[in-house]
Amino acid sequence: MADQLAQWWRPYRELIGSRVRSQTAYRRSFALDVLGSAAVGVVEFAEVYIIFSNVDALGGLDFAGVALIFALANLAFSLADLVVGHLDELPRYLRTGTLDAFLLRPLPVLAQLVTSDISLRRLGRTAVSMIILAIALPLNDIDWTAGRIVLVGVAPIAGAAIFAALFVCAGAVLFWLIEGAQFSHAFTYGGNYAATFPASIFAMPMRVFFTFVIPSAFVAYLPTLVLLDLPGPPGLPQWLGWCTPLAAVGIWAIALLSWRAGVRHYTGAGS
Amino acid sequence: MAAAAAAFTNTVFGLIRAYITVAAIGAAGGELAGYSAAQGVTYAFLAQALIGPVHIFGWNELAERVKTGDVAVDLARPVDPQLAFYAADLGRAAYSLIPRGAPPMLVGAAVFGLALPNTPLPYLFGAVSVVLAVSVSFACRWLANLSAFWLLDVRGVTILYVLTAGLLSGHLLPVHWFPGWLATLAHATPFPSMIQTPIDVITGRIQGTEAVTALGIQAFWLVAMLAIGRVTFARGARKLVVQGG
Amino acid sequence: MIISVQDLRREFVVRSPIGRLKRERRVVNAVDGLSFTIERGAAVGYIGANGAGKSTTIKMLTGILVPTAGTVRTCGLEPVADRKSLARRIGVVFGQRSQLWWDLPLAQSYRALAAIHRLRESEWTARRDELVDRLDLGSFLDTPVRQLSLGQRIRGELAAALLHSPELLILDEPTIGLDVLSKERLRVFLGEQRSSHGTTLLLTTHDMDDVQRLCERIIVVDKGRMAYDGTLPGLVERVGAQRVMTLDLHQPSEPLAGIPGTHVVDVEPDGLRQRLAFSPTETTAASVLAAVSTRTDVRDLAIDEPDIEDVVRRLYLSATPN
């Protein structure tokens, strides 16, 4: 079984391995990139810090609580960005005929596209998020049960899966709207932005949108409600915080369907 | 098409930021650093509307031209390079004002209602302020790009610029909300002149002599950054010519 | 049959702007009712002008594009539906686009491809060594693909396409841009692969020497339709192109006019060399030579086959206008 898994993984490992090697080849540039990505994380956190230098609570949570949400959301997003952030370059792959080359290989197109690049520099942001997480968790005085310990490990991973699915949806759109990359940024980067703040600050329509259409709230806010044992706002009961993996499965189903539709459109099957 | 997409993204971010602002002001008891909920929302959408024209970051054209050597063409032309690029940038800003500015404002007005003055004077001053803001932004971007004359890889400078400009210009949150030390730091840079000042003027938050002073500060930064830019460019061009590019 | 195409059709919708707001919508039939079959082990040349539908056909054969109508079967599989299975059994080389990884050395590309095709270590290294030897890749195996010359890159692509020992090799303009020597080496290699491994070859090209040297059968496509399907000599005959016999004489002679079935193309000033054109359907080289020999002594002769570009052009012109 493990051997079969290793065999299945072999081609992808080869492809990603070469990307990793070529990115880390230029040490100084790579270090700068990582630093830059970390700096972005710091500046975004500065926004939270500035708000809390003026008020004590936001959306019913204090600084420690919002910091926790911020950390979880950015950790999830940076991991997803690391693996599939380059999907918005699909138009370039179409233009250079690389997608045709993918179609001529006995592997799924999406898998080849995902493993054709990896943005190692995002690790800077990942590092910043983990540091903030490490500080925020004890600050929040959480009543640690077994369930909560599992949750804090699962939430970022499921959250990363959610963001990855959003990237795939955004990529799929590019099969139709070649110049639509900016358009889908609204949903990927916007989805991340919405995830870094408590969903309770939104009016009902937006709250529903950023929970059940784009599952931003599932990434960090809802799990945080569980961790801090707080009641949710109208429309979002606390127990939804356990459902992040479910949300990930749901959005991935949509992502794979849209991707398939996109490839079919490209091969002329859908038109 | 690309402009429409960018405007869409700005609008979405504007909406999210508006809610954040409202929540923060609500938590502060209805008023924060002189901003009511309505004023906070207006700030958020105006900031998003200005992002396109002011073009806070993301301009690498000069750096690219230095890297590829195309800058030699610019040096050979009878037109002053800095002024030529400046004129082009003003044109770009003018062209993008409605496509990038209108959607966030319209959506903001529809969803929240905006707190905008109903006298003409703030808008007149505001127009001048926006032109100055675009200019200051250009002058600073120009200067940042000049690092290409000395650095093989301008990545570090670009990142630093994105961060400081993004934060200190007031594009995320009003500079007036910053804790004391950060506000002082911001005001020691030209960045607030790019977003904070034009919004203050347009919304009528500062009027009369205060507004004129603010415009004066913008003008000061414009002249200063342009001047530093000219000197640095001359230095860089000389280095290029001496070393053969 | 390794390739079977029946009534194949592919439409494209072309939108061209008229004025600033309106757009005209036109349907173009890139491939318009094509039917043919190719047997295993064959070598077929697929010829046509630019825009005649060659690339579109290739895309439909390989699973990149879906037909609008008609059926296509490659290696017995439906190309788009069974794309991944098909990919294991065919190799494709595009002369003008690379399928290799731009910044990787060839050696690494081959390792990646071996992993992608899930080839066993022993079998693919042996195959790779054979290809490296036959295509003379040894000197640049460790050079990144982007630094290779065109000729080197094409050889590398060929090896990449053959690494998994496909039954069918499809080449889209493989010799374009290559010098004469490189083209010849490539043709020799392809001929070898065919005879030693039984690989079927389908080749689109503008170079008629490719066709002449490699292919037993030639399919000419024009405006998405079949214009000719048969052998190259048959095509020459059908179009009535002429062979030219160049005669070197012992003594200067008057122009050799009046020989049945021929006409004089030119006579060199010294009268020692003359060129006679004749149609292979009307007379034979032997008859012409015999007739000439009764008039004068021939020291040497050469026969030029018709210019194939000319042949194909004549075919287009003679095809039923639509």
Image (cartoon, coloured by chain):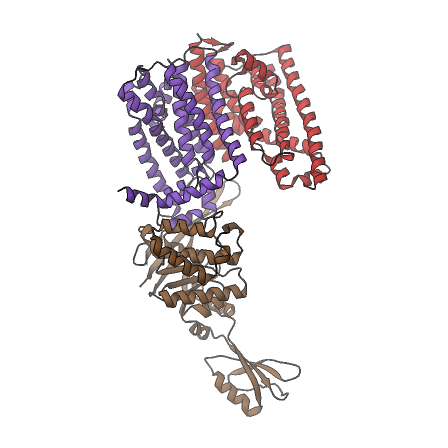
Please identify the quarter of the rendering in which residue A227 is found. Answer: top left
- Name the colour assigned to chain C in the rendering: brown
Q: A212 and C132: which one is in front?
A: C132
Q: Which chain is purple?
A: A
Q: A209 and C115: which one is in front?
A: C115
Residue C227, compared with residue B14, is above or below; it is below
Residue under the image location 37 percent in, 42 percent down: A110
Q: B47 and C120: which one is in front?
A: C120
Q: Which chain is red?
A: B
Residue B45, compared with residue A263, is above or below; it is above
Q: Horizontal and vertical percent for residue B180? A: 55, 11
Q: Horizontal and vertical percent for residue B153? A: 58, 35
Instruction: Indicate left or right for A271 with B8 as reference.
Output: left
Instruction: Indicate left or right for C62 with B174 as reference.
Output: left
Q: Horizontal and vertical percent for residue B158? A: 56, 30
Instruction: Indicate left or right for C79 with B191 as reference.
Output: left
